[in-house]
Image (spheres, rainbow, N blue to C red):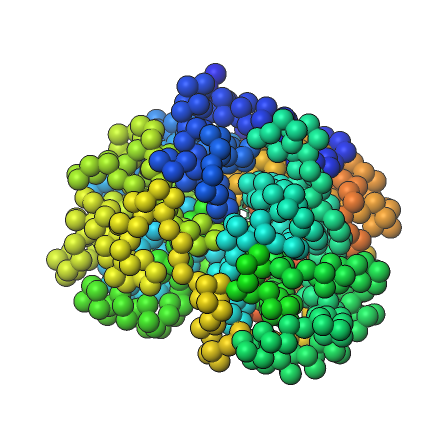
Amino acid sequence: MATKPPAGDPVQDAPQVGPPQHAAAGLPAIAHTLKIAHAQMGLTRTARTLLKVNQKDGFDCPGCAWPEGDKRHTAEFCENGAKAVAEEATLRRVTPEFFAAHPLADLAGRSGYWLGQQGRITEPVYLPEGADRYEPISWERAFAVVAEELKALDSPDEALFYTSGRTSNEAAFLLQLFAREFGTNNLPDCSNMCHESSGSALNETIGIGKGSVLLEDLHQADLIIVAGQNPGTNHPRMLSALEKAKKAGAKILTVNPLPEAGTERFKNPQTPQGMLVGTALTDLFLQIRIGGDQALFRMLNKLVLEAPGGVDELFVREHTHGYEAFAAAAREADWDETLTATGLTRAEIEQALAMVLASKRTIVCWAMGLTQHKHAVATIREVVNLLLLRGAIGRTGAGVCPVRGHSNVQGDRTMGIFERPAEAFLDALDKEFAITSPRHHGYDVVRSIEAMRDGRAKVLFAMGGNFVGATPDTEVTEAAIRRTSLTVHVSTKLNRSHAVTGRRALILPTLGRTDRDVQASGRQFVTVEDSMGMVHASRGNLPPAGPHLLSEPAIVARLARAVLGEASRTPWEEFEKDYAAIRDRIARVVPGFEDFNARVARPGGFTLPHAPRDERRFPTKTGKANFTAAPVEYPRVPEGRLLLQTLRSHDQYNTTIYGLDDRYRGITGGRRVVLVNPADAAALGLADGAYTDLVGEWSDGVERRAPGFRVVHYPTARGCAAAYYPETNVLVPLGATADTSNTPASKSVVVRLEPCAQPAPRRSAESAGTAGATGPTPDPAGARQGDRNVG
Ligand SMILES: Nc1nc2c(c(=O)[nH]1)N[C@H]1C(S)=C(S)[C@@H](COP(=O)(O)OP(=O)(O)OC[C@H]3O[C@@H](n4cnc5c(=O)[nH]c(N)nc54)[C@H](O)[C@@H]3O)O[C@H]1N2
Ligand SMILES: Nc1nc2c(c(=O)[nH]1)N[C@H]1C(S)=C(S)[C@@H](COP(=O)(O)OP(=O)(O)OC[C@H]3O[C@@H](n4cnc5c(=O)[nH]c(N)nc54)[C@H](O)[C@@H]3O)O[C@H]1N2
Ligand SMILES: [Mo]
């Protein structure tokens, strides 16, 4: 029955464990896709939506930011993209009757999975002060409430405007314009928790915080290093690119504490041969200890320096700065320290070196496995050092490839969603709109939480996302949010952020990527920028989830009029009527968008300029690509403790949980699992199937606990453990962030495992147990605070 959400809270969390798989995609992926899509959308809608994903006249997949090639298949989507589409295009609805039947305390007791499964939100709802449930509100009145709270602030800097990376360029541009006209740079975004470390490292070293390769570069590389990334689950279409590269002779070096099925073998569902046999992808697997990458790349750099002909001397001389200081530091790299930090053998590192030296065209791809550590920025700079030594930037088939997460997270930043905007950007904005943007920097995500905690920020307005669920230190964050006077969420679906509110709260339902967007001037499209700087149009083709939804640009435009009133000379009404008018302004403010409307009208869109890639020009302070030489760091773990990484299962999109299985890792029917190396488990006396609490240990002495995880013996690197986000966000201290980028260090949390009894299975919300805003729900299964996000 396509439209019926599960009745009770289905989270049983009784995980079953089988062997991990060694190949990704293939037939099981197609079967799983169709099952999920059919359950949410029914048959006709499944066909109608899935055939439009990533087509030139269709919509951009709301899944990951991986680019589309020029030659597209009829079914240019992957299993997880299809799940993202089905999640949004579902026929299930959350109506005012739903909110009448589910008081806030009830919502607060539900799992994130259950909340998401209820369907699309159809009307704006409001939680007045002291009320026990949301009630319907008109759009006009909703904007009046926000205006009232914003105008009552002592300073515009008491307001926070969060953005999640699905927001279109048009909506993002309007949101940052509104925030700056209102008077603040408080524009935290999901990127602060994601690739901020990449942006920080790349800006300093090559002068632009974006990757320097295009899809064709991957196809032409000699060597692709995939470090700290799980493309089989999180960027499945990348596997086709890796396969194509392999077939053209490339080697693939994988660096990961976990053997991930997707990088082992890919069964391409587009060809019969691929489906049956598949292609082995990884040539060398370095099973590194968590946080050991900087040490690994430093040692590789030392060895490259020592190898005859290892250094591209011409490139170094003509294009780089800081070589001497860096080379001196690299020559100091020590084998003992490297082997301790990485857990690798000398032979393995020498094998990797041979692959690096044999390659003229090297690309390094990475994601959260490198960005979410205390020394993340230094690690990524060390990756850049290697590519600079080899002259592997601004050359075909070579370069840096940070693989971005949300489908438009890169575009949102290009549009000015940034708490530390460049002076030149603000100058252009001010000139175009005759405004005076504030010049002082705003708060990023972590600083926003601190500001709410300390009473310095009082209104949180979120353009999408799940602020409460995605951020670290869940208990601290929830308490901080509850201190605010107003929380506003522009959302497609319910999540934990709607249940943990300020004194008053609003939920404003909006159109998603798959929905048709019609405004006064006719049918609209929006634009997005993918991970490789390609900008293109996205057009939804489904009737919207309800007649009352407003698009994101319309919501920002109406909010701006309600808040700024006559004082604003910006033509907000015109922008709402016709998004082309927004694009005309973007063209005049943002470099690279000249003639935007004409160029984006071409099928496939256009590529943004990238100086290092296009002309080997490095717009840094020195005018060259910068070598850097940070001291080598790696996490130190006390005796009897493990280093926990918090990562994604195959059945989730960040805090959106599609299902309770992690097929490639052999886990079904539950998410509260902790993967531990069998030798470590034996040393700790933990049998496979035993239950344990995860207890975080950090320098502030506060005990952070996530209770009731099933131990799974798993071939991860020694001393390391892995468990899913967001269940484990309660363990990540707010203060544990990366140097420079301030990204939460969600991939290196020191924990001890405290054996506990197997929790009783929970049948419904009544047993999910958590402290809601209006009082805790009784919890027969015992205190399960760590459950708050997903169960
Ligand atoms: N289906 C699906 N697609 C998604 C998402 C999703 O949740 N679901 N999320 C999107 C978003 S926003 C993002 S940012 C990306 C995330 O994409 P990924 O970064 O691939 O996501 P994670 O699950 O966090 O996986 C991190 C990987 O890094 C490895 N790792 C952890 N620590 C280390 C380390 O210290 N060193 C090395 N070398 N490796 C390490 C882990 O074992 C794991 O393989 O995916 C995007 N795409
Ligand atoms: N411990 C730990 N924490 C992490 C991470 C980790 O690896 N470990 N990863 C971090 C990373 S990389 C990221 S990017 C963040 C993600 O942080 P967020 O982007 O804030 O979180 P999501 O779970 O992607 O947000 C999902 C919600 O977005 C809303 N939504 C979906 N589509 C749309 C749309 O089109 N418009 C609007 N307005 N709303 C929409 C829905 O209501 C949905 O519930 O989490 C971070 N947190
Ligand atoms: Mo992300």
Q: Residue at x 45, y 49 (%)?
A: 530
Can you see residue 362?
yes
Q: Residue at x 32, y 45 (%)?
A: 602
Q: Nearer the viewer, residue 516 or 453?
A: 516
Q: Residue at x 17, y 39 (%)?
A: 520
Can you see residue 763?
no
**Outermost residue, top side:** 1
Can you tell which quarter of the image residue 675 is in? top right
The location of residue 692, given as percent across then percent down, is 74, 43
The location of residue 319, given as percent across then percent down, is 54, 76
Q: Is residue 238 left or right of residue 553?
A: right
Can you tell which quarter of the image residue 377 is in? bottom right
Q: Is residue 449 left or right of residue 355?
A: left
Q: Nearer the viewer, residue 273 or 504?
A: 273
Q: Residue at x 67, y 48 (%)?
A: 249
Q: Nearer the viewer, residue 325 or 405?
A: 325
How many numbered markers are drawn? 0
The location of residue 191, given as percent across then percent down, is 48, 56
Quarter containing the C terminus? top right
Q: Nearer the viewer, residue 649 or 330?
A: 330
The location of residue 535, given as percent across then percent down, is 38, 50
Q: Is residue 551 left or right of residue 565?
A: right
Residue 615 vs 532, above or below: the answer is below
